[in-house]
Image (cartoon, rainbow, N blue to C red):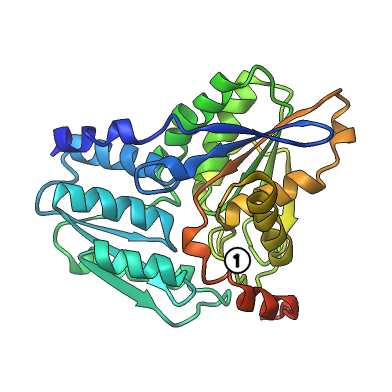
Amino acid sequence: MLNKLHQLKSLIGNTPMMKLDHPRLELYAKLEGYNYSGSIKDRPAYVIMEEAIRTNKVGPDTTIIESSSGNFAIALASMCKNLDIKFIAVIDKFTNPANEALLRVLCHDVIKIMEPDETGGCLLNRIRKIRSLLIELPDAFWPNQYENPLNPKAHYEGTAMEICRDLERLDVMFIAVSSGGSVTGVSQRVKKEFPNCRTVAVDAEGSVIFGAAPRPRPIPGMGSSMRPKVLEAAKIDEVVYVNEHEVVNACNELLNDHGLFLGGSSGGAYAAALKYDYDALGVENPVAAFICADMGKVYLDNIYNADWVAQLASYEPNYNN
């Protein structure tokens, strides 16, 4: 089984770094959609699965279970399909329809949580379902992306290593936050290689990760209804919040001005980069980079759908929800 997993290794990592035209800085996009299953989540999925198989936590009769709104579940499901082992994805009613459709093709089973939890989202109820499945299933393994230290390690040794290798200088790094693995691992490595670099966590308005009040977040892929434990080791200098209107505008600017068809968190990171105060860095010709977690094809029903965007134009968030 381990040998079969290792055959996928060449399909993960060494993703492109693209320089974008910008009038006052060097701006680079790290394009993680070129990974095996189409997102940055292939990196932690591979590292966690490799360790689990090596230590006999996962074998031919194991059922992998995970809570995920999309990309991490798709990464695990793709690998489990290749390894011929069962994978159960626990999603919820806010999951992107395109992601749900793909998961129902790849997974042994998909469990969809419909009941909101006390935050107004469904993440906490997804976690509760996972814990009940661990009791019900005799041979189950939970990768637990929110607490597993191998999640940020995969980005420290992979994503961040490549960024530091490809850039001679880096003044500010923008990283969208969800499960916390990428911002933790990348911030640790970037700070080691470029001590003066500012690491900026990009969060969605309505996310509770950094203590803000919860409210509905119409665009999936960024933000969370809880603070992931892996974030405890992150080296974050500041947090920039972006709203759904900024994300949509940024995604369309990436497409129309740079030819990049990217997902919501990519747009969020780019939006943060566009409005950042570079004068505060105190350097000439600043060098900035942002991570693009996935491509835009699963966002055709929302970000790239004219009718959906028209409805979003009149969207007024309910901050009391």
Secondary structure, mark 1, is loop
Residue 222 lies in quadrant = bottom right
The answer to whether residue 142 shows anywhere in this view is no
**Residue visible at 37% across and 52% down in the picture:** 144
The answer to whether residue 35 shows anywhere in this view is yes
**Residue visible at 52% across and 35% down in the picture:** 185
Q: Left or right of 214: which side holds 226?
A: left
Judge by depth and name the residue closer to the eye, 140 or 314.
Answer: 314
Screen quadrant of the N terminus: top left
The residue that disc 1 covers is: 303
| Position in image of residue 207 (x %, y %) | 64, 63
| Looking at the image, residue 5 lies above or below residue 297 | above
Screen quadrant of the C terminus: bottom right
| Looking at the image, residue 188 lies above or below residue 63 | above
**Residue visible at 65% across and 17% down in the picture:** 168
Packing grade of label 1 (10 A; few <14, some 14-19, many >=20) is: many
Judge by depth and name the residue closer to the eye, 254 or 164.
Answer: 254
| Position in image of residue 50 (x %, y %) | 25, 37
| Position in image of residue 81 (x %, y %) | 20, 53
Q: Amino acid at mark 1?
A: Ile
Q: Left or right of 264: which side holds 44?
A: left
- Of all residues, the one furthest to the left in this rendering is 61
Judge by depth and name the residue closer to the eye, 230 or 293.
Answer: 293
**Residue visible at 43% across and 41% down in the picture:** 34
Q: How many marks?
A: 1
| Position in image of residue 132 (x %, y %) | 29, 70
